[in-house]
């Protein structure tokens, strides 16, 4: 997969309350068209007024889950990017609430690849969670103390991986 080719020219919204994070992501995604927001209110306004290929949303500090709801309503896939919100609970909530990906800020240098994973999966009508698990599963295994987080929610993750297309219908009891 050629990540640069997949994301070149894509319109991305990045919402994070840390200016340094926004600046780093702008540098890493220079081949994309980027809008940024430092607050929930600004992110909400941009989501409601513009069309995006993808939104990168911080969880803490900008009400990321509230922005995720708006992104879903606007049919904008969302990649949750977090440091302080990195937990099993937030991972599952992100997936259940319709996020397409959940990445740690520790791995921000790979943002191009994560975004390409989502866009490529959507174009192929596949779940982006397949590549997410392949790419970041071992990271979360070490962060969460082993594979128990997967086993506790085995059916949930199997359904996410089997799902076709995006967004997921969160009202579907099978997902």
Image: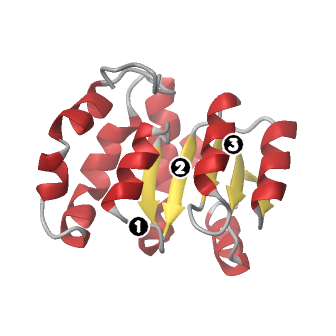
For mark 3, give the secondary structure. loop
Label 2, on which residue? 79
For mark 1, give the secondary structure. loop
Kindly identify the residue that appears in the image at 71 percent across and 44 percent down. 9
The answer to which of marks 1 and 3 sits earlier in the sequence is: 3
Instruction: Give the camera-side residue of 68 and 137.
Output: 68
Please give left or right for residue 58 compared with residue 27 in the image: left
Kindly identify the residue that appears in the image at 69 percent across and 38 percent down. 70
Distance of mark 1 from mark 3, alpha carbons? 27 Å
Badge 2: residue crowd in 10 Å (few <14, some 14–19, many ≥20): many
Instruction: Give the camera-side residue of 1 and 168.
Output: 168
**Quarter-of-image position of residue 52:** top right
Badge 3: residue crowd in 10 Å (few <14, some 14–19, many ≥20): some
Distance of mark 2 from mark 1, alpha carbons? 13 Å
x and y percentages locating residue 6 in the rendered image: 55, 41
Please give left or right for residue 158 compared with residue 47 in the image: left
Label 3, on which residue? 10
x and y percentages locating residue 95 in the rendered image: 41, 42
The answer to which of marks 2 and 3 sits earlier in the sequence is: 3
């Amino acid at each position: 997969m050629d990540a640069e080719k997949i994301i070149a020219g894509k319109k991305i919204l990045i919402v994070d309350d840390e200016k340094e994070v926004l600046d780093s992501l702008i540098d890493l995604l220079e081949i994309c068209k980027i809008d940024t927001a430092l607050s929930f209110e600004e992110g909400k306004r941009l989501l409601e007024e513009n069309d995006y290929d993808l939104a990168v949303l911080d969880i803490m500090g900008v009400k990321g889950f509230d922005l995720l709801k708006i992104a879903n309503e606007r049919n904008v896939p969302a990649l949750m990017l977090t440091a302080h919100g990195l937990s099993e609970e937030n991972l599952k909530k992100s997936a259940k609430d319709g996020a397409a990906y959940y990445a740690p800020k520790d791995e921000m240098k790979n943002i191009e690849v994560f975004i390409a994973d989502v866009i490529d999966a959507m174009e192929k009508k596949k779940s982006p969670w397949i590549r997410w698990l392949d790419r970041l599963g071992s990271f979360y295994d070490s962060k969460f103390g082993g594979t128990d987080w997967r086993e506790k929610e085995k059916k949930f993750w199997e359904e996410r991986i089997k799902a076709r297309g995006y967004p997921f219908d969160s009202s579907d009891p099978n997902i």
